[in-house]
Amino acid sequence: MDFVYLVTPVLTWMVVGPIKFLITSARQRRWAFNLVGNGGFPSNHSSVVTSMATLIALREGMGHPAFGVAVTLAFIVMIDANSLRQHVGRQAAAINRLACETAGHVVLRERMGHTLVEISGGIATGIGMGFLVNALLG
């Protein structure tokens, strides 16, 4: 079994997470531990699926069925990150406004989705990680 296909998304996630934390902290001008999670630049999810699609393209070729599956999965993940999760964030904001004076209300996180720039950053990072892993472990 070739473990490079398992290592690539894990390494990508481990590289992108700290990058996102540092960028968010720089923008907020403070350590942004409470802002770590969904959303932010670059998109972890987009990076992970793009790194896998890139690795498959480099190792198996773009004509391989696995590449088609990887690209399809990547599109689904990116569409979800951009639209569905942004709608969830808007619903959380509305619930927070309505329930702000309710005893015991836990404030819901409103920043959930990604912008197109954040997704694009994830795509670029994922492609870079796919090439890097292929060069180092290929």
Image (spheres, rainbow, N blue to C red):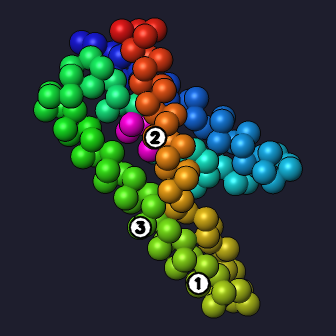
Percent across and percent down for residue 121 are 54, 43
Residue 117 at what x, y percent from top left?
55, 53
The tag on residue 122 is none
Determine which residue is flagged by label 2.
Answer: 123
Question: Can residue 38 be seen from the camera position used here?
Answer: no
Magenta segment: does it hold 49?
yes
SS assignment at label 1:
helix
Residue 95, disc: 1
Which comes before the other along the chain, label 2 or label 3?
3
Predominant SS along the magenta part: helix
Sequence-wise, the earlier of marks 2 and 1 is 1
For marks 1 and 3, the one nearer the N-term is 3
Within-10-Å neighbours for mark 3: few <14, some 14–19, many 20+: some
Q: What residue would you read off at disc 3?
A: 84
Closer to the camera, 54 or 24? Answer: 54
Single out the mark in the foreground, 2 or 1: 2
Residue drawn where x is 69% and y is 80% of the image: 104
Question: Marks 2/1: CA distance?
Answer: 32 Å
